[in-house]
Image (cartoon, rainbow, N blue to C red):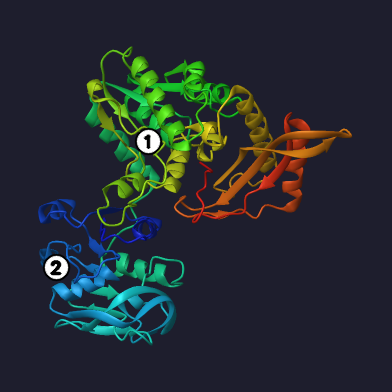
Amino acid sequence: MILIIDFGSQYNQLIARRVREYHVFCQIESPDITLDHIKSLNPHGIILSGGPSSIYEKNSPEIDSRIFNLGIPVLGICYGMQFMINTLGGNVKKAKKREYGFADLKIKKQVDIFKDVEKNESCWMSHGDSIESLPPGFKITASTENTKIAATAYGKKRFFGLQFHPEVAHTPKGKTMIRNFLFDICGCKKTWNMKSFADTAINLVKEKVGNDRVILGLSGGVDSSVTAILIHNAIGKRLTCIFVDNGLLRKDETKKLKLTLREHLKLTIRFVSARTKFLKALKNVEDPEKKRKIIGRIFMEVFEAEAKKIKGAKYLAQGTLYPDIIESISPFGGPTAVIKSHHNVGGLPKKMKLKLVEPLKYLFKDEVRSLGKELGMNDDLVWRQPFPGPGLAIRIIGEVTSKRLSILREADAVLLEEIKKAGYYKKVWQSFAVLLPLKSVGIMGDKRTYENIVAIRAVTSKDAMTADWARLPQKLLGTISNRIINEVAGVNRVVYDISSKPPSTIEWE
């Protein structure tokens, strides 16, 4: 495995994804990881990430310098390179000219990390500090016009430093450099795959749970469904899933999930209808953050009441993914402002005293989909687009009512039907309808109308950290618009959202 030290880079998850793409397991840890913990992980190599800090700043991140005495290959990227060089006796100073964006890299020798890389390559820079002098044993291996020491190596000790970012797509041969580090320098093997993960995860669940019972809050999304099937394979009927119908789901959602999860996959599921309770609590509420908090609170009340009926349950299973873990533990790179409350179950009341089981906590979304296929899930479930916990409540701008929910459900059903028919459902990350708090004038059947506006949102993305609006064909957009206006009572106008993330979020609320 490869250990990645998080110095606060916005690209940490991307480094991990690049390593995983080569079927090598990796784990991201904060710089305060102990030397003993590192030894227990027994990594084949260590990658020190970039970060926004300067090594001369007060409280800038640093890791135990004894990692350089372990005999393990180390790759320092950007700040990680500067930390390594400064720690081992080199000198880092503020650059005369900050380098950001594309740069032409001139490579001295096409060996080690630069094997199969051209002597002149493009790379992506993002730094304000530069290395002025190197420690003993290090040599310059690449330069740019503004940065004399753009890459360095101490071949005998297998220490390598890159001032640029090999993990981003803007460095075309960056993946090759990472590949060289993994296999030629660290001697890794391609053993990370979903079959081996499934076997290991099932055995770990068996070992952890023993003969006890597990409860899982099932949403019907990919993450919770894969978690349920994996745990079911480990402990069978001792897993009980609870599905709370909050009345904020898409058209026929509960019926479809009952058929797929209970009948086809033989899971033990308790379906709890709480539509009236949720709608009553949401009456006259327009603020999106208040909506989320109300939905979260009611969900917990309903879930807890149902969970109490399950005797002997000692564990709560959750479909937590690796990005959730990384973003919550990063002391340097995590977001500092609340954009919106997280829509997943964050944990149950302490009085329930349930221990957590999170078998997917080291996986990314695409890996979860691969695992689902490995476990025999059908394509409808594996490729189900992400759906927020608060459901349609945050796709209705303004107050949530039965009538507005009905309008949005029908419009959303038309949209998804046409997206699937056109073969775009798997091509986009998410596609959904939003009901606006506005009305507009229209003409239908030679009569003046004053009806609702529906917005269509479709985005492409790898992991939802960034997203771009999907360039759907005009003919498809026209078909969707015509059908919604003609078939959904109360709608006379359809608009298409062409904003990207950032600055916009994927969801409207």
- Position of residue 282 relative to residue 331, above or below, is above
Q: Position of residue 425 (x, y in %)?
A: 61, 44
Q: Which mark is residue 319?
A: 1
Q: Amino acid at mark 2?
A: Phe
Percent x, y of residue 144 = 37, 85
Q: Label 2, secondary structure: give it.
A: helix
Sequence order check, earlier mark of 2 and 1 = 2
Q: Quadrant of residue 350?
A: top left
Question: Where in the figure is residue 376, as x and y percent of width and height?
Answer: 47, 35
Q: Quadrant of residue 17?
A: bottom left
Instruction: Give left or right: position of 278 versus 472.
Output: left
Point 26% across, 57% down: residue: 332
- In the depicted view, which residue is nearer to us: 468 or 505? 505
- Which is nearer the eye, 280 or 348? 280
Please state the total of marks drawn on the protein image: 2
| Residue 390, image x, y percentages | 47, 32
